[in-house]
Image (cartoon, rainbow, N blue to C red):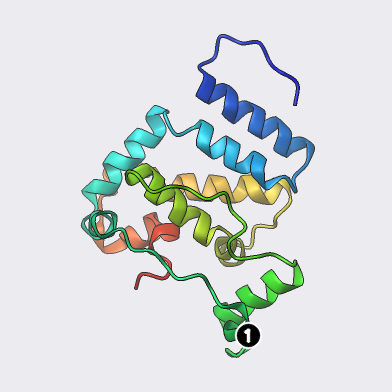
Amino acid sequence: MPEIESELPPYILKAVQGFIAFANNPGDTEAVFDMADGLRDTDLYQHFIEYAHTQPAVAQILKERYFAPTPDLEFLLNYPQNSLGYLYASTMKAAQLDPVFYRQIQVEDDYSYIALRMRQTHDIWHLITGFGTDLGGELGLQAFTLAQTHPPAGSHDSERSHLLYPEIFWSTQ
């Protein structure tokens, strides 16, 4: 990718470069990770982490640092054909995707833990939301995630926090 001269902070530049690379090649998952990693130091993410701690169920998961096991696609294919487990496994197998395709993250803090959980559950959210894996689908899923993880003030309803943080809660209940 060509170097872009800018007065933007390096982390924002990384996110922009990732977006451009992804727009040019929607199959470039490294570009998606560059976008996410580039946004790590933004106020948006800091607000997200602060908000996560106001949700008792999410704060507990952050404290415990629950790590989901890697999905066993062959095992999940034994589930009923109309189950989420079967649909996930059959979709992943048909697309020849490995459940651990994502860029690995060393968990050092709340942000890195949440980023790992979001990467672990990203593909299942495509199935749940119906968003495809093309550019529009990926952007739609990112918009869905943003809406779930950065709600407007006043929506501090801990009973529905699993809806606000779906990618963290998947496989924890």
**Picture coordinates of residue 139, whole percent (x, y):** 63, 44
Residue 110 lies left or right of residue 129; in this view the side is left
Residue at the outermost right position: 24
Which residue appears at 56% of the width and 46% of the height?
A: 142
x and y percentages locating residue 122 in the rendered image: 55, 58
Q: How many marks?
A: 1
Q: Indicate the position of residue 59 as horizontal and vertical percent values.
A: 24, 54
Label 1 sits on a secondary structure element that is loop
The residue lying at 60 percent from left, 65 percent from top is: 99
For the residue pair 75 and 142, the one nearer the viewer reads as: 75
Quick one: quadrant of the C terminus? bottom left
Q: Which is more toward the observer, 81 or 115?
A: 115
The quadrant holding residue 75 is bottom right
Outermost residue toward the front? 106
Residue 160 in the figure: left or right of residue 141: left
Q: Taking 173 as reference, is 120 above or below it?
A: above
Where 142 falls versus 100 (above or below)? above
Residue 18 in the figure: left or right of residue 144: right
Quadrant of res 171: bottom left
At horizontal 37% and vertical 43% (from top left) the residue drawn is 111
Q: Amino acid at mark 1?
A: Leu
Q: Please name the residue that numbered disc 1 is placed on.
A: 77
Q: Residue at x 21, y 57 (%)?
A: 56
Position of the N terminus, as image quadrant, is top right
Q: Position of residue 51 (x, y in %)?
A: 28, 43
| Crowd around label 1: few <14 · some 14–19 · many ≥20 (10 Å) | some
